[in-house]
Every structure is written in C-alpha cells, then in structure tokens.
Image (cartoon, rainbow, N blue to C red):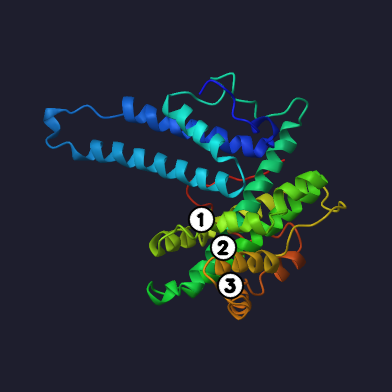
Amino acid sequence: MNKPVPGMEELPSWKLRLLERIQNTSADHVRVLLQGHPTYEPQHGSGEIPMQTWRTHLRALAADQHEIEIHASAVGVPAAAITEARERGERGLRWGDSVHSPPTMRHGQDPVRAHMVEGAAADVWQLEHMAAISVAHRLRSIDARFPPDPQAHQQFDRNMAALWRRANDTGHVIGLTGDEHAELWGRDWQGWKQLVGATVHRYSDAALHERWRAYAWGGIEHEARRGIDNLAAGAALERPGAGPQTLEELIGRATEAVINGHDGTGTQISAAIGDALPHDVIGPWVSQADGEPVLRPPEPGSSAQYEL
C-alpha cells in the first residue's frame, strides 16, 4: 500500500507506539527467518539444537507480535492500521522507513511525559485484560480442571492492586488531561465488548489459564512497587484531577461484558463480581507509607518503569 492509513495521524502517541512495535516485531521475524537460520555442520551430527533454537526464536517473535496485535485491537487501533503495520514489517520495513509512518512523538511533546503516558496506558490495558481473564477463568471453573493454587490467586490480586496504584499515581504526577483520562480510562460498553471479543472469548481454556498464570507472576507486583517508589521519590503525588476506575468497577464491567457475550443473567454477574474481585488488597497499598517497599528479589528479565 502506497497511501497512509486513514486516521493514523489522529491516534495518540501510545497507540502509534503499538503499531511501531507490531511492525518492528514483524520485521524482526522476517530477518530471523531469512538470515538467522543456522548452518549445518557435519561434525555436529544431527545438529538438532541450533535448529530448535532458531525455530524457538521464530515462535517467540510470532507470539510477541500476536499479543501486541491483540492489545492494539482491544484498545481501538484501526484494524487496517494493524494489518498495514504487520504487512510492512513482513516486507522487511521497520517503522520510519516509509514516509507514511507518522512519528510516534508529536511536535513539541515532552518525551518524558509521553513515556509516562505510554506506561500508564500499558498499566490500564493490563488491568482491563486481567479483569477479563480473572472473570472468565472463574466462570469457566478452570480450577476444577487444573490444580488449584490459592497463593497464585492471591498474587494475581496483589498484582492488580499494585498496577492500579501505579497507574493512579502516574496519572496524578503527570496531570492527565481530560482527553487523556477519557482515552486511558474511559472504556465504554462497546469498548468492553470489543476487549472480551478480542481476548477471552477467543482463548481456549489452556490459553486462558496460561495467560492467567503469567499475570499471577510475582515479578509484576515487584516492578509495580519499584515504579511507585520512583514516582514518590521524583515528584509530589498530590495533584487534582479525576481518578481511575476502581478495581470493583473494572471487574464489574469485565464481568458484564464476558457474561452478556454468553447470554448470562444479572444474578450470574453479581456472583461473578464477588468471586473475581480482589479482596483486601487495596487498603494496605493506600495506607502503607511510601518508601517501605516489599523486599523482593528482581525477576529475570525485569526492568523498572518510570524511573525519574
């Protein structure tokens, strides 16, 4: 396609960054496919390990690209823009190689603030995705088929609480505008239907449980707490402005969207909200004094966000 995709210029920077990641990951996949394959050496016998390593790398890139595309679709990035970014990457073009790739940083935009808005948007997406996954995981009674793990459930809840706190604090530090707040937190009913339609309604039980397990990883809480500590050290948090939706509101809207997609009832919705809502996790985070982080070793591959 030689023409720009309509509407891309109006997308906020954090959505353009999703398209950039899709295109660059697609380009990386093509590069590894065409140039990264191993050369067979007769002295290595069957040589299975280099070939398995190459194919594992390709699968990892494909899986990463798929997850970014799910994210982009669920937050309302136009399907035509997602397809175009993927196809340009498949042609070996990275973001910015074409004159039709708009800059992800607007003219005059503060790069630090833009980075923090992008981080807050990522936290909001993760919270919404986790809410939908938590509801679907419980409604499908997956714990009846997979070994139950109460500690993982508790960690999942703590992760949601930590992400909510970081998103809330970030919003106050950077002073989200009304439009930014609506863009990040204002998912309406159609938006929730779009989210569950792009995610949990397409996940098999195994795929749903895999994602639930990934979101129950303790490193998520650890990184969120580091981000909160950095925010507290770098700027005052007491700024006026609208706050985010509560966890109860997120779970409630996710529950309604998940159940209504399968002809559920109001009674089911109320029960599911009570089952899926994280219990007794917000209070300690709000009341605990800043500067007293939980001491937890860094997880492999982790990196702190919002370091000021």
Residue at the limit of the structure toward the front, as seen here = 263
Across and down, in percent, residue 135 comes to 55, 68
In-front residue for pair 41/185: 185
Q: Amino acid at mark 1?
A: Thr
For label 1, the SS is loop
For label 2, the SS is helix
Residue 36 quadrant: top left
Determine contact: label 3, label 2, CB under 8 Å: no
Question: Residue at coordinates 38% horizontally, 72% vertically from top-left?
Answer: 146
Question: Residue at coordinates 61% horizontally, 52% vertically from top-left?
Answer: 125
Classify 55 as above or below 291. Answer: above
Which residue is disc 2 drawn over?
132
Q: Is any atom of residue 307 visible in this view?
A: no
In-front residue for pair 83/112: 83
Across and down, in percent, residue 180 comes to 76, 45
Across and down, in percent, residue 35 comes to 32, 24
Q: Is any atom of residue 51 visible in this view?
A: yes
**Labels 1 and 3: the sequence-earlier one:** 1
Residue 118 quadrant: top right
In-front residue for pair 30/299: 30
Which residue is disc 3 drawn over?
276
Q: Amino acid at mark 2?
A: Ala
**Labels 3 and 2: the sequence-earlier one:** 2
Residue 57: mark: none
Which residue is disc 1 drawn over?
199
Question: Residue at coordinates 72% horizontally, 70% vertically from top-left?
Answer: 283
**Labels 1 and 2: the sequence-earlier one:** 2
Determine contact: label 1, label 2, CB under 8 Å: yes
- Could you give the CA–CA distance between mark 1 and mark 3, rounded to whole angstroms? 17 Å
